[in-house]
Image (spheres, rainbow, N blue to C red):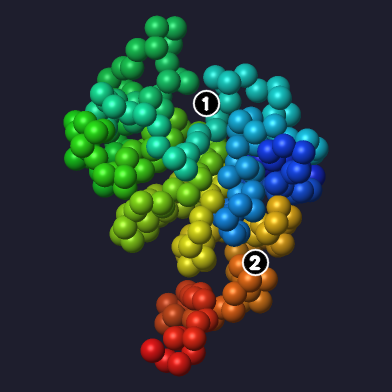
C-alpha cells in the first residue's frame, strides 16, 4: 500500500514549549487512523502541522512521498482534504454552494463550476443523507447540518488523504455513525484518513489504526484491536475503565464510576 503521510520525530506547538514531542506515524492508503487523547495534548496541532498551518520545530513530514514544504497550495488541495474543528463564515451561501467550494482545486482558470462538478456535489450530499440541504441557506442550518456539509465539501475534493478534526462534533448518534460509515467505506476503497475523535467506542467501531497521545507524546500506536486495551486507555485518560464484548464481537468501553460500581 502507498504511504500517504509519513511523520518522523515531529515536535510542534505554540511558543517555546512544544505541544507535540517526537511523534512518529505513517498512514497508508486503505487506513483510517483515529487520534485519541485528553484535551490539550496536541491532537489538533498534529493535523495543523501536516497542513502547514502550524510550524514545527523538529522532525519531518512527507505527503505522498514529497517533503511537506515542496507542495504548492493548489496541488496540495487536489490531494489532501481537511474538515476543520470549527465553523467558517458561510453566510449568504446555500448548502450546495458551500459543498461546491471543495471543487475549487480542480477548476480551470476562471474558477467556474460545471454541470459535472454540481453532479459530484449532489451525489456526495445524497451519499451522506443530506441532499435536502442543497438549496437551504447556511444561516438556517443547525451546527450538525453544517458539520455534515463540511464533510461533504472535503469529499468532493476527491482527495487521496482526508484529515478530520472532530468530525462528529454536534452530530447525533445516527449522523455520527452515518458520517464515519461513509468515511470508512471510502477508506476501504483506497482513501487514507486521519480523524481526531473523543469517543473511544466510535474509534473501536471504525478505525483500522489508532494513535494515542498524552502530554504531547505517543503513548501507543498501531492496529486498533492491539492499541485499544483497557490498561492503555486508563493510562491515556487517567480514569479507571471498563471493557465489555457485545454479542456482535464489538468491544465497548466506559469509565468506571462509583455509580457503575454500585450497579446503578
**Residue drawn at (72%, 47%) of the image:** 20
Q: What element carries label 1?
A: loop
Label 2 to label 1: alpha-carbon separation: 35 Å
* Residue 160, horizontal then vertical, whole percent: 54, 36
Task: Categorize mark 1 by other alpha carbons within 10 Å: few (<14), some (14-19), many (20+).
Answer: some
**Residue drawn at (59%, 79%) of the image:** 240
**In this image, 69 relative to 40: left or right?**
right
Nearest the camera: 196 or 191? 196
Q: Which of marks 2 and 1 is in front?
A: 2
Residue 78: assigned label: 1
| Residue at far bottom of view | 262
| Residue at far top of view | 110
Nearest the camera: 116 or 141? 141
**Residue drawn at (71%, 52%) of the image:** 216
Q: Name the residue under label 2.
A: 236
Is 39 placed above or below 116 here? below
* Residue 118, horizontal then vertical, whole percent: 29, 25
**Residue drawn at (31%, 57%) of the image:** 172
* Residue 45, horizontal then vertical, whole percent: 63, 42
Task: Categorize mark 2 by other alpha carbons within 10 Å: few (<14), some (14-19), many (20+).
Answer: some
Residue 219: assigned label: none
Is any part of residue 68 visible from this angle?
A: yes
Quadrant of the image occupied by residue 243 = bottom right
Is any part of residue 64 visible from this angle?
A: no
Q: What element carries label 2?
A: helix
**In this image, 27 relative to 173: left or right?**
right
* Residue 129, horizontal then vertical, whole percent: 26, 47
Amino acid at each position: 500500500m502507498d504511504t500517504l503521510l509519513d511523520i518522523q520525530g515531529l515536535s510542534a506547538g505554540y511558543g517555546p514549549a512544544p505541544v507535540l514531542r517526537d511523534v512518529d506515524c505513517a498512514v497508508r492508503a486503505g487506513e483510517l487512523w483515529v487520534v485519541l487523547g485528553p484535551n490539550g495534548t496536541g491532537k489538533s496541532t498534529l493535523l495543523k502541522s501536516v497542513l502547514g498551518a502550524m510550524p514545527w520545530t523538529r522532525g519531518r513530514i512527507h505527503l505522498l512521498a514529497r517533503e511537506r514544504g515542496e507542495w504548492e497550495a493548489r496541488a496540495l488541495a487536489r490531494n489532501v482534504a481537511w474538515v476543520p474543528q470549527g465553523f467558517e463564515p458561510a453566510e449568504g451561501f446555500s448548502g450546495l454552494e458551500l459543498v461546491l467550494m471543495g471543487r475549487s482545486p480542480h477548476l480551470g482558470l476562471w474558477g467556474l463550476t460545471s454541470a459535472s462538478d454540481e453532479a459530484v456535489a449532489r451525489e456526495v450530499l445524497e451519499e451522506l443523507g443530506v441532499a435536502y440541504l442543497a438549496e437551504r441557506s447556511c444561516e438556517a442550518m443547525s451546527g450538525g447540518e453544517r458539520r455534515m456539509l463540511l464533510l461533504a465539501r472535503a469529499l468532493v475534493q476527491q482527495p487521496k488523504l482526508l484529515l478530520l478534526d472532530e468530525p462528529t462534533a454536534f452530530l447525533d448518534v445516527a449522523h455520527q455513525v452515518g458520517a464515519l460509515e461513509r468515511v470508512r467505506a471510502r477508506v476501504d476503497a483506497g482513501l487514507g484518513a486521519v480523524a481526531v475523535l473523543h469517543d473511544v467506542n466510535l474509534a473501536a467501531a471504525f478505525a483500522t489504526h489508532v494513535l494515542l497521545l498524552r502530554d504531547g507524546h505517543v503513548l501507543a500506536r498501531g492496529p486498533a484491536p492491539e492499541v485499544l486495551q483497557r490498561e492503555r486507555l486508563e493510562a491515556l485518560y487517567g480514569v479507571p475503565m471498563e471493557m465489555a464484548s457485545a454479542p456482535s464481537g464489538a468491544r465497548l468501553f466506559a469509565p468506571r464510576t462509583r455509580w457503575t460500581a454500585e450497579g446503578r
